Image (cartoon, rainbow, N blue to C red):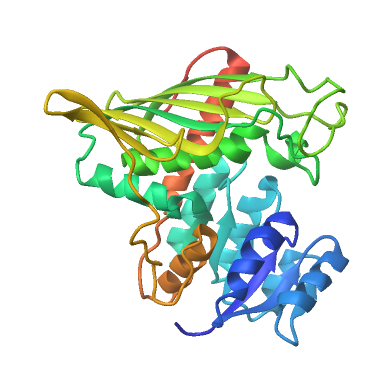
Amino acid sequence: MNEFKIAIVGCGGIANCKHFPALAKIPEAKLVAFCDLIEERARDAAAKYGVPDAQVFIDYRELLEKSDAELVYVLTPNRWHSEISVAALQSGRHVMCEKPMAINYAEALRMVEAAKQSGKLLTIGYQNRYRADSLFLKDHCDRGGLGEVYFARARALRRRGVPTWGVFLDEYAQGGGPLIDIGTHALDMTLWIMNNHKPKYAVGTAYHKLNAQTETGNGFGSWDPAKFTVEDSAFGFVVMENGATVIVESSWALNTLEGGEAITALSGTLGGADMYDGLRLNGILNGRQIITRPDLGAGGVPFFPGASSDPSDVEQQIFLRAVSGEGELTVLPEQAAVVTRILDGIYESAKSGKPTYFE
């Protein structure tokens, strides 16, 4: 690959935990500009990950005006994903935007249109697609191994895993709680593996049942009830245009022992699969019910020679190679927009008490 001049907008948790470490493994990735509302945070990131003369900004508009970056990573809270991505695309940059794509479907469509008009690439940070189990199951379904997949569960359940840092609990900044935060990963992966991005309608419920509790047992420390303005759990029943049903389950706080994050279960006419206890395939063989567990640790190789097979690392490789014309995007903006559309529909249904129909 050629060298890439990259600008980072948002130098918080997701940048430091996911994107910076992954990009640091790619010699061709040159981080030339950093932007954050907290200037010290941007300066710290520039000192640790940037080129020697990396620029620092507190306003993304100034970055787009003054930086020679060719790619922009949008790693801010959800509300500003669309605004910054659209501006970056219109300025002639390729964009990697963190999940969820946008705070609502209308904003996601703005991003899709901006990418089309600019001719630049836009992708969304759904790295769970690159896991070994996801890739195996996707390939198995594409080969017809499950037949017609007509029922699925997209699960992202935490018993007590409320993120108490940053703006996760702020409905204005994030647009929602566990559904838009972790449910989005499970839903994206499920629709992608099914190869079905045509929803018909959704029925949803969202709960604020545990927000006010003070003895929380939370894995990340007790939350402040006054600041917990998003749902603690949300669920959706989605019917696709072809009649398939997808159940969406998400929670940060739920009294359940059935956990699991960014996992799926599929049922088809020829067999089924789930990720509840590792990847398991089920079916009928010689008139008997069988369960098969693929050995995902055997014979596995990285996507690219000499590259890591860690999903976050693969995500960067896929994006940068697509930008350089050496491959195609795996996460298309049109697909990510459908995920946002369904999330929107579940939230709308939860508020109205009625199904949300997608025209």
Residue farthest to the top? 353
Is 191 positioned to the left or the right of 258 in the image?
A: left
Is 121 positioned to the left or the right of 157 in the image?
A: left
Q: Residue at x 72, y 66 (%)?
A: 61
Position of the N terminus, as image quadrant, is bottom left
Residue 36 location (% of width, % of height): 78, 63
| Rendered view: 253 above or below 198 | above
Is residue 126 visible to the viewer in this orientation of the structure?
A: no
Q: Residue at x 63, y 60 (%)?
A: 18
Position of the C terminus, as image quadrant, is top left
The front one of 266 and 299 is 299
| Rendered view: 150 above or below 82 | above
Total residue callouts: 0
| Rendered view: 282 above or below 331 | above
Residue 104 location (% of width, % of height): 58, 38
Residue 277 location (% of width, % of height): 46, 35
The front one of 346 and 127 is 127
Residue farthest to the left? 286
Is 78 positioned to the left or the right of 110 in the image?
A: right
The front one of 50 and 32 is 50
Residue 252 location (% of width, % of height): 67, 31
Is residue 342 visible to the viewer in this orientation of the structure?
A: yes
| Rendered view: 36 above or below 186 | below
Q: Residue at x 33, y 62 (%)?
A: 299
